[in-house]
Image: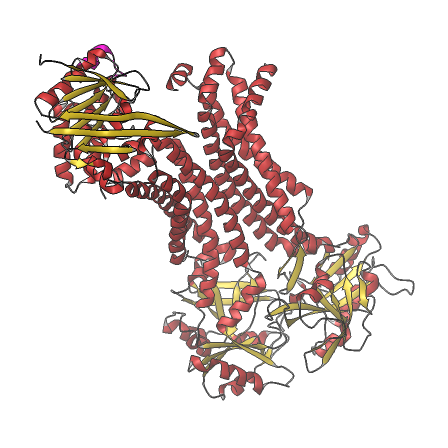
């Protein structure tokens, strides 16, 4: 199995005032293509930092990061932005949709960076909304959608440019149990039927149960690895 | 461009605030349009002065007259095409408030010397053959509803008739002239010098000033000097200027309008800079999470800079155009007070340029901040 | 209630430094509006003041009937004498009427500032002119002698035009005139004039008549008698006016224009300042959403909230008006502006930033402040508490 994500000896430090704080200590990680990985750990463990590094929105202080065949730790500026738009889809805890755009315009955003025509773009938008079963809500604004619906729009946005990797930061953190289950089920479908590699940060064990395996992080280091057999 | 819906949506994120900012900019440019419009209109009037014409006045001041006899002397000067003369009649119609710019002239000299006045030939002939005839400007006709054939009594504030000792002069309207290039000059009246000179009780045989049409404008300076030399050391010395210089010196005496307008506009734009700048800063600060998401989606740093700048530009230019448009609509209202008619088109161009500068000035810092936004920090907040 | 108002208001004002950036928007917007309004009105006031200047209730000016200004009028010698001998005119110790039949002409002279020509009034005055205008006194040199081509020039004229220093000579009408004195006239329109002996000016300009007759009356009440005598005289066709009225009419057009300018421009700027103020106050309120919602949840009623917002807005407006008025006063008070007066010649007038103008400025500022604060204040008071508390 080819590795979709590979972290080698990754260190991340922040400067907090005059102090240097090392958040990740010489981390190694491999995520196989088609995997659905849950990252768990107490707050301050660095799990969000790992996610940000994998998603290419942060740089390691040292070490190698290879995602989808690219050394993204060596990419900068416009090149990194381009890489992101082609290879990664983000799903956040608070959806982070543009409040003044309709659902379909929100989903269209990543495609504005491509050279597709308007017709092409809207075709893909509709397809993405179909995958998350929200075609009938296309014209609604986020304020007119329920939490679950908004998150599904966010997932559609993450899918629309057909990235290989989905990166999710507490995607069900703001949802009630029933809605959370719907979302997690959707993610599972995307992984099993559409072959998307998913890395998900969560503090919810029930959410982690939907993943193929879970990694535990504590104080910047992996502590355990539990393999879950296919259900 | 495909980014327009996004930019528009970002602008209207907070409807009330954007509307108020738009209003402020609109108002500032309404003012700009009107004030700079007046300024420009005055300048244009001067620029449009006919280069082929000289104005010959008494050296002491324009209120002193010149002898009629000078005309034949001026005609003999080489380079002179035609000589005409005008005098200040100074009448009003019924009420001192209704002042009229009326000039006794010799029509066969005056109208050829002023080719910009369009009047049908038969009307000119009518004036030559009607002793108390008058040709009025289209603007004047419209103002008082006068038509050809009307008899109008005017009261001169200066000239008294020898026959009856009063200052009421009667005229018959025989023609209407138009000046399509300078509508503000359509408010004058021309009548026969002969009628004027014969009937007046004093200063007979004199004219107010001469208009000299030259064959070659590049000779203006020499011809002007020659005219003044011809009459130097006479009891009535002359001062000859090009029509443009004449207008300019008159404008100057009214005051440094340019300075006042500049001062006011400077003050306004200073305040506007503050107001808009503060709003844009505020807006971008609030947009930080959204800008972070856009960056996450793959929008490059440079693209973010452009996005914010274009937002600023759209707001400023659209508001400016609305304000300038309104000014253009209201401008003709100034006709009665200031005599200017149309807002010059250059003012709109200037306005848009100013709007763009405003947009850049207020938008550059927030745009830079957007460019330098660090995603993880912004998402955290 | 008062305690609530004071408590909320002082809390609000204490948090103002955090919002200082947006607060400046109101201050500057209003400062600029007030500055422009006050300075243009000062121009209008200054102009009127100059023309009205030293007008006295017991001086009257006589022009030919129908003339609006001296330059348009002509009065012949005989009529001039009749007017000066009319009842109501005060006489001096020698029994001569304190009156002056005057010739008013225009001279074009080069200005100091750029050498271009501008019109100046040359007034030929009668022998009793000094007694007629006691406010006019020489500050340098001496009075001109009759029948000699000598002039005295007003302070403002001397300052504006080239060649009007003591001892200089001006040439026109194939003769030379010497400047022998400089006079002060308490800042009225005469200070922009040149004055000489009427007869001498007449002969130089080859004229025989006068433009006006100005007379000192026995008293202000004598005006009606004086006017009655002149208007019923069949040999005269004249208009008789009190000096104050004459000057008031002279300044009407320009004053109207300046007032129009002030209110039009000022009005538009006020609208602009208002929208800026609204923007700022809306922002102020939204920054304080949590604080306001908490206060109301605790039990403070809407009124103290509204008042606290209005107080903030008014305070900023007043600061703005003080800055604007100070700027107008600093830059313009006492400055001179010159323009074309009614006599077709230059009049210099002094800008006066009066106390009443400053008060108008504050008034305008407060109005803007009130309007700018009202709607946001109401919104603050009506904030749905629960959503506000949750949203943060």
- Residue B89 lies, with reference to residue A27, above or below; the image says below
Residue B364 picture quarter: top left
State the image coordinates of residue B314 (x, y, percent, origin top left).
34, 43
Q: Against C336, is B58 above or below? A: below
- Residue B130: percent from left, percent from top: 46, 74
The magenta-colored residue range is: A172-181
Q: Is residue C41 visible to the viewer in this orientation of the structure?
A: yes
Q: Is residue C74 visible?
A: no
Q: Residue at x 52, y 40 (%)?
A: C29
**Could you tell whether C159 is left or right of A123 in the image?**
right
Farthest residue to the right: give it. Answer: C93
Tell whether position A24 is magenta.
no
Residue C97, position as x, y percentages in the image: 85, 63
Residue found at x 51% / y 54%: B262
Please tell me whether residue C168 is drawn above or below residue A38 in the rendered image.
Answer: below
- Residue A175: say if magenta: yes
- Front in this rendered view, residue C237 or C347: C347
Residue drawn at x 13%, y 19% as measured from the top left? A188
The N terminus of chain C lies in quadrant: top right
């Amino acid at each position: 199995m080819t590795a979709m994500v590979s972290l080698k000896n990754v260190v991340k430090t922040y400067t907090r005032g005059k102090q240097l704080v090392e958040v990740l200590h010489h981390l190694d990680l491999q995520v196989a293509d088609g995997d659905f990985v849950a990252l768990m750990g107490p707050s301050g463990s660095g799990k969000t930092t790992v996610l940000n590094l994998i998603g290419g929105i942060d740089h390691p202080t040292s070490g190698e990061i290879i995602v989808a065949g690219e050394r993204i730790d060596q990419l900068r500026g416009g090149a990194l932005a381009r890489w992101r738009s082609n290879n990664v889809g983000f799903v956040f805890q608070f959806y982070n949709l543009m409040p003044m755009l309709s659902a379909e315009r929100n989903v269209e955003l990543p495609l504005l960076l491509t050279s597709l025509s308007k017709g092409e773009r809207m075709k893909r938008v509709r397809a993405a909304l179909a995958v998350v079963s929200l075609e009938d809500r296309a014209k609604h604004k986020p304020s007119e959608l329920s939490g679950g619906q908004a998150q599904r729009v966010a997932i559609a946005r993450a899918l629309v440019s057909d990235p290989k990797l989905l990166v999710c930061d507490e995607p069900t953190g703001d949802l009630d149990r029933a809605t959370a289950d719907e979302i997690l089920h959707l993610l599972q479908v995307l992984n099993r039927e559409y072959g998307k590699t998913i890395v998900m940060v969560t503090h919810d064990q029930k959410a982690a149960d939907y993943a193929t395996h879970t990694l535990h992080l504590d104080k910047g280091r992996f502590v355990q690895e539990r393999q879950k057999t296919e259900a | 461009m495909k980014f327009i819906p996004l930019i528009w949506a970002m602008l209207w994120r907070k409807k009330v605030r954007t509307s108020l900012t738009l209003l402020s900019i609109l108002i500032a440019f309404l003012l700009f349009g009107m004030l700079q419009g007046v300024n420009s209109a005055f300048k244009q009037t001067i620029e449009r002065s006919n280069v082929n014409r000289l104005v010959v006045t008494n050296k002491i001041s324009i209120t002193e007259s010149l002898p009629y006899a000078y005309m034949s002397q001026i005609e003999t000067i080489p380079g002179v095409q035609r000589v005409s003369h005008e005098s200040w009649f100074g009448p009003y119609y019924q009420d001192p408030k209704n002042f009229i710019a009326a000039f006794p002239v010799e029509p066969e000299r005056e109208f050829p010397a002023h080719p910009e006045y369009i009047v049908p030939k038969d009307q000119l002939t009518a004036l030559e053959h009607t002793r108390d005839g008058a040709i009025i400007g289209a603007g004047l006709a419209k103002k008082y509803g006068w038509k050809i054939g009307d008899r109008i009594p005017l009261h001169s504030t200066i000239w008294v008739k020898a026959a009856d000792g009063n200052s009421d002069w009667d005229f018959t309207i025989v023609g209407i002239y138009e000046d399509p290039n300078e509508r503000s000059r359509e408010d004058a009246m021309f009548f026969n010098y002969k009628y004027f000179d014969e009937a007046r009780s004093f200063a007979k045989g004199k004219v107010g000033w001469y208009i000299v049409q030259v064959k070659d404008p590049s000779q203006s300076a020499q011809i002007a000097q020659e005219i003044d030399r011809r009459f130097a050391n006479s009891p009535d010395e002359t001062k000859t200027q090009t029509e443009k210089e004449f207008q300019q010196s008159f404008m100057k005496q009214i005051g440094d309008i340019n300075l006042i307008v500049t001062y006011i506009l400077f003050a306004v734009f200073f305040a506007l800079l503050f107001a808009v700048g503060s709003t844009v800063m505020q807006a971008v600060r609030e947009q930080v999470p959204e800008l972070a998401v856009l960056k996450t989606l793959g929008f490059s740093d440079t693209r973010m800079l452009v996005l914010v700048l274009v937002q600023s530009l759209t707001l400023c230019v659209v508001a400016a155009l609305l304000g300038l448009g309104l000014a253009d609509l209201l401008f003709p209202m100034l006709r009665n007070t200031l005599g200017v008619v149309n807002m010059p088109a250059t003012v709109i161009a200037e306005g848009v340029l100013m709007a763009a500068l405003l947009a850049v000035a207020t938008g550059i810092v927030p745009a830079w901040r957007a460019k330098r936004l660090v995603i993880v920090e912004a998402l955290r907040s | 209630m008062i305690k609530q108002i004071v408590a909320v208001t002082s809390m609000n004002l204490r948090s103002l430094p955090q919002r200082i950036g947006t607060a400046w928007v109101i201050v500057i917007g209003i400062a600029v509006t007030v500055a422009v309004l006050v300075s243009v009105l000062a121009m209008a006031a200054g102009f009127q003041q100059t023309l009205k200047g030293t007008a006295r209730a017991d001086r009257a000016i006589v022009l030919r009937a129908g003339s609006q200004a001296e330059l348009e009028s002509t009065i012949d010698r005989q009529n001039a004498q009749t007017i000066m001998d009319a009842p109501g005119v005060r006489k001096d110790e020698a029994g001569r009427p304190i009156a002056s039949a005057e010739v008013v002409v225009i001279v074009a002279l080069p200005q100091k500032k750029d050498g271009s020509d501008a019109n100046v009034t040359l007034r030929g005055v009668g022998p009793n002119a000094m007694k007629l205008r006691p406010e006019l006194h020489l500050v340098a040199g001496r009075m001109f002698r009759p029948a000699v081509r000598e002039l005295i020039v007003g302070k403002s004229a001397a300052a504006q035009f080239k060649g009007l220093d003591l001892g200089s000579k001006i040439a026109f009408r194939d003769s030379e005139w010497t400047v022998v004195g400089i006079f002060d006239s308490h800042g009225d329109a005469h200070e922009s004039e040149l004055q000489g002996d009427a007869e001498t000016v007449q002969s130089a300009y080859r004229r025989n008549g006068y433009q006006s007759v100005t007379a000192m009356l026995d008293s202000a009440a004598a005006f009606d008698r004086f006017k009655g005598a002149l208007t019923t005289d069949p040999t005269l066709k004249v208009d008789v006016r009190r000096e104050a009225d004459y000057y008031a009419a002279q300044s009407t057009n320009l004053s109207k224009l300046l007032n129009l300018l002030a209110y039009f421009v000022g009005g538009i700027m006020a609208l602009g300042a208002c929208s800026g103020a609204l923007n700022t106050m809306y922002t102020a309120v939204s920054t304080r959403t949590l604080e306001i919602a908490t206060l109301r949840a605790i039990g403070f009623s809407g009124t103290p909230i509204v008042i606290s917002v209005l107080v903030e807005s008014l305070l900023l407006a007043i600061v703005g008006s003080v800055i604007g008025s100070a700027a107008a006063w600093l830059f313009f008070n006492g400055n001179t502006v010159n323009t074309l007066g009614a006599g077709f010649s230059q009049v210099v007038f002094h800008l006066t930033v009066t106390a009443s103008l400053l008060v108008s400025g504050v008034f305008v500022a407060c109005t803007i402040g009130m309007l700018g604060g009202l709607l946001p204040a109401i919104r603050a008071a009506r904030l749905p508490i629960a959503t506000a508390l949750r949203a943060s």
